[in-house]
Image (spheres, rainbow, N blue to C red):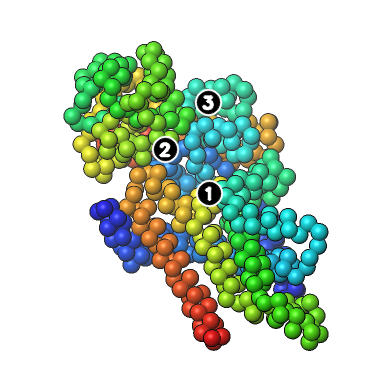
Amino acid sequence: MEIVLEGIKKAFFLLFSLDEEIVGITLFSIKISGIATIISVFIGIIIGFFLALFHFPGRQILVALLNTGMGAPPVVVGLVICLFFWRNGPFGFLGMLYTPYAMIIAQALIATPIVAGISLAAIQNIPEKLKKQIMALGVTKIQLAFFLLREAKLSILAASMAGFGGVISEVGASMMVGGNIKGYTRVLTTAIVLETNKGNFEVALALGFILFLLTFAINQALTAIQQRESKNRW
Amino acid sequence: MLVIFRFVLFSSLIFLCSCLLAAERKVVLLATTTSIQDSGLLDKLVLLFEERSGYLLKAVVVGSGQALALGRKGEVDVLISHSPEEEKSFVDSGYGRRRPFAYNYYLLVGPKEDPCSIYKAKNAEQALKRIAEGKCPFFSRGDNSGTHLVEKKLWKKIGIDPVKEKWYQETGQGMAATLKIALEKKGYTLCDSATYCRVRGFSGFESSHIVDRRLRNIYSVIEVNPQKFKWVNEKGANEFSKFLFSDEVGALLWKLGKEKCSFPFFIPYERWK
């Protein structure tokens, strides 16, 4: 158990001494996962809305696929992306493997089904009567979409937090498409794996603690917004 | 609505352009093994090489097996590995050219108490025989790494197949993790001298070891054959390979690890020849 205490002590030390490398890795992690989440929220909400409002043959299969995608193993997503961006692959000439861009793409692909799936459920959860009332006022589909978006704000925020949480903590895809290159594609999770493999368990725990603090801080901010909205409604 | 659409289009175009630009810089892709990274050597090499040559050296750390597999597909320009037999077949198949640049020793490591009395053994084979006879816990990498292959060859030499035995356990993990597990469980393992020296200090366990000087752990640099894969950065790979034999790197190798051990983590190969 002392190892856990050592880890926490080390985490505080690393944080307050503003160790250059740790700060760099932390900011980089936020950047990559942040951009990926923003992309996934944008695309995810559109997909969620589309599937909620438009009914067409084969829709149910698509929804099932989407829900499956929520649980897709990130490392498999990483492997598939590698297949495309390896030099031997169709997009190899772009030289995108082992770059931050590849990591953003991978994380966006992982987060999008999560955001889309939760958004879909959120919109379907809005009472049918409300939808009918609004449509009776003669709105266009786009206006209806914006209205529903406002109604489902709380769930959409939850979806975003789920998406962000999913990618800030994932390690398989980031390792495969990023390569964990020092100063270039190393994020908190891949750094933790590295330190664990080296046998530096205290440093690994410290990084894990920093990751937890980071995720908590961001979610705290989003939750505050979410719960404030919730107060206004009741 | 139109504003949002235009914004999205614009930003995706920017994203795409920067993706393409990322491919323009002079990049050398290196695949190397965990021991090079964990010892701290890799970070120093990357810093020095990038300073000297102006290339962006992207080092991906995988096992020896995977490094060679990546080389066989031309996914990397140059590799450092330490699995001489596999490397030789790699070269024989025409995938690249190889040059050993450093080495250290494989040690049989275990608890200070030495339940199977191996530290007085004449050589590695005798030590392993004693472990098998005494059924002392032995921990193997079990991951087809260079270390694991050397270990397997030794068991084969003495005619023992330990894989199904209860005292033989495969961790499937890196060297440092395997060593820590072995020491914690008071068992033996085959370990390279660099990792042993690095880890034994903070492992918290009293340990000892025996070295059989015939068991050399040889690190080689391999340039992937540009004729097989036209996209390989031949110049960059060659420059990195030459760099490893420079005086600067030689001095670096002699120094690394000296504070902790009686000999460096990686002894320049030329010294042996």
Residue at far front of view = A129
B100 relative to B155, above or below: below
Q: Can the viewer see residue B97?
A: yes
Q: Are marks 3 and 2 on the same chain?
A: yes
Amino acid type of the residue that numbered disc 2 sits on in the rendered structure: Gln
* Residue A72 sits above or below residue A160 on the image: above
**Residue indicated by mark 3:** B87
Q: CA distance from mark 3 to mark 1?
A: 28 Å
Circle 1 — which element? helix
The amino acid type found where label 3 is placed reads: Glu
Residue name at image x 27 percent, y 56 percent: A6
Q: Position of residue A92 (x, y in %)?
A: 69, 45
Q: CA distance from mark 1 to mark 2?
A: 16 Å
Instruction: Kindly tell me whether residue B26 is visible in this rendering.
Output: no
Q: Which residue lies under the disc numbered 2?
A: B173
Residue displayed at 32% across by 52% down: A202
Is A104 above or below relative to A120?
above
Q: CA distance from mark 3 to mark 2?
A: 22 Å
User: Which mark lies nearer to you, 3 or 2?
Assistant: 2
Mark 3 and 2 residues: CB-CB less than 8 Å, in contact? no
Q: Chain of mark 2?
A: B
